[in-house]
Image (cartoon, helix red, strand yellow):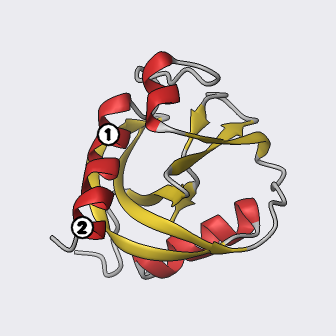
């Protein structure tokens, strides 16, 4: 058996909240969807450190990672991918998008439910239930649960 044999890639994403709004980024590359900030981990990278790095690279924001909300495993571009999705809170920073994204928007859960101004594409990415779960967890934690 080979040492350092990795079976699949690992990605991390953030349901990033600021004033009860989620940050969504419009991807430039296929699939050009709206999605939370995040990306793939470097080899042997701690998931929370990797998520902070990805958010800093994509937005220039500093964040507080709160807790995992969701995991997903499946095929992504022909390869197995495990994704760990975290609840995170905006701390500071001025938005500066990376070359990977063409636009950014802060949206409420009600705007996501209406599909305005942003319509999620659950076939290719995240769905409304993911955001609702993250918001519910944020409310529970805020109430001292």
Q: Which of pointers 2 and 1 lies earlier in the amino acid sequence?
A: 1
Of 46 and 44, which appears nearest the observer?
A: 46
Q: Secondary structure at mark 1?
A: helix
Q: Position of residue 65 (x, y in %)?
A: 44, 75
Residue 74 visible, this angle: no
Few, some or many residues within 10 Å of mark 2 (<14, 14–19, 20+): few
On the image, which quarter does residue 103 sit in? top right
Q: Is residue 7 left or right of residue 35?
A: left
**Quadrant assignment for the C terminus:** bottom left
Q: Position of residue 31 (x, y in %)?
A: 61, 28
Which numbered mark, 2 or 1, is in the foreground of this view? 2
Q: Secondary structure at mark 2?
A: loop
Few, some or many residues within 10 Å of mark 1 (<14, 14–19, 20+): some
Q: Position of residue 40 (x, y in %)?
A: 52, 60
Label 2 to label 1, Cα distance in Å? 17 Å
Q: Is residue 125 left or right of residue 74?
A: right
Q: Is residue 13 left or right of residue 72?
A: right
Please determine whether, in this image, residue 29 is positioned above or below residue 121. Answer: below
Q: Is residue 44 left or right of residue 63?
A: left
Q: Residue at x 42, y 34 (%)?
A: 126
Tell me, for residue 143, which label it has, or none.
Answer: 2
Task: Give the residue number, with chain letter if any, for mark 1.
Answer: 132
**Quadrant assignment for the N terminus:** bottom left
Please determine whether, in this image, residue 139 is positioned above or below residue 102. Answer: below
Among all residues in the image, which is located at the extreme left? 145
Q: Position of residue 118 (x, y in %)?
A: 61, 25
Q: Residue at x 50, y 24 (%)?
A: 120
Q: Residue at x 26, y 52 (%)?
A: 71
Q: Residue at x 27, y 45 (%)?
A: 133
Of 6 and 32, which appears nearest the observer?
A: 32
């Amino acid at each position: 058996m080979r040492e350092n044999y990795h079976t699949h890639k690992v990605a991390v994403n953030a349901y990033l909240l600021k004033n009860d709004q989620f940050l969504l980024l419009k991807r430039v590359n296929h699939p050009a969807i709206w999605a939370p900030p995040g990306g793939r981990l470097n080899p042997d990278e701690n998931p929370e450190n990797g998520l902070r790095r990805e958010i800093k690279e994509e937005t220039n924001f500093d964040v507080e990672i709160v807790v995992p909300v969701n995991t997903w495993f499946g095929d992504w571009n022909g390869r197995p991918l495990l994704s760990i999705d975290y609840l995170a809170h905006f701390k500071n920073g001025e938005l500066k998008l990376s070359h990977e994204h063409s636009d950014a928007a802060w949206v409420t859960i009600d705007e996501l439910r209406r599909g305005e101004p942003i319509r999620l594409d659950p076939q290719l990415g995240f769905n409304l239930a993911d955001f609702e779960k993250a918001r519910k967890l944020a409310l529970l934690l805020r109430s001292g649960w």
